[in-house]
Amino acid sequence: MSTTEDWFAELRRALGAARVPEEQITRTVDELRGHLAESGTAPEEEFGPADRFAASLGGLAPAPGEPDAEAEHWTWTADLFNDRRMLAVHGDQGWEVESLDSLGRFVCRRAPGVALAWEYRREVLAGRRRAAVLGALEPEGWELCGEWLVYGYFKRPKAATDGPAGALRTLPRTPAGRLFLSRRAKALLALWALASVAAYASMGLPGFAVLMAFGGAAAAVVTANLETRKGRETPPTS
């Protein structure tokens, strides 16, 4: 059986032969070494032969943010009660979040042949907590991929933690929907619609505008305070 360094040397050779950029090879190797340090297992025992594992990663994978004419691009959003669940679902389908746009939507890409599953997490990054969260998560391979209000969204490829199980063999179709609301959000929207109709009927357009402005501001403040307080009480864990 080859040594750990022999295995990683073979992995580098195989990924290089598949034209994977050197920066991405180094990032992949670092993530795998971190996983092995936690699991205490040998690379061949955990991932199998290096050349086969390199093939399971899907060959050439453009670095995040690089243009790729063949990549699929998809933007979607969810409410704060549902975003983590939907990130888990779409991450398992190979969607990588590149950023959050100005409306808080997840801007994703998925390149054919790459077939990597992704895992995500949401953390509060308000105030002094930001440095603590980044300091705890970045050494574990988590990368900040977007921010919204007091939240930071992090990603990392599942291949770094699940081994071969993190590489997808087939890719599901791009989802037809772009908005994923939880039952709680739908109920709140229904109540909001009734209140808006009542405000408009009793006070006209000015009353409706005041309700919209006040309600939106109140919701943002309450949500931010709740999440920030929860973030102070609960330190980030892997």
Image (cartoon, grey):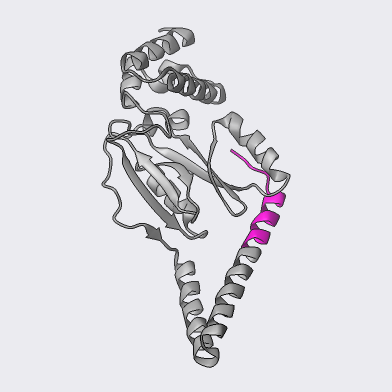
**Is residue 5 positioned above or below 138 on the image?**
above
Q: Is residue 112 left or right of residue 133?
A: left
Quarter in which the N terminus is drawn: top left
Residue 98 in percent (x, y) is at 45, 41
Q: Give the residues in magenta.
A: 223-238
Q: Residue extending furthest front? A: 206
- Residue found at the far right of this picture: 128
Q: Is residue 55 above or below residue 114?
A: above
Label the magenta part by its dominant secondary structure: helix
Q: Position of residue 82 (x, y in %)?
A: 47, 58
Image point (51%, 77%), residue name: 192
Residue nearest the viewer, comparing 197 with 13: 197
Q: Quadrant of residue 48?
A: top left
Give residue 231's position: percent from left, percent from top: 67, 51
Residue at 59% from the left image edge and 32% from the top image edge: 138
Residue 94 visible in the current orientation: no
Q: Residue shown at 46%/20% (left/top)?
A: 23
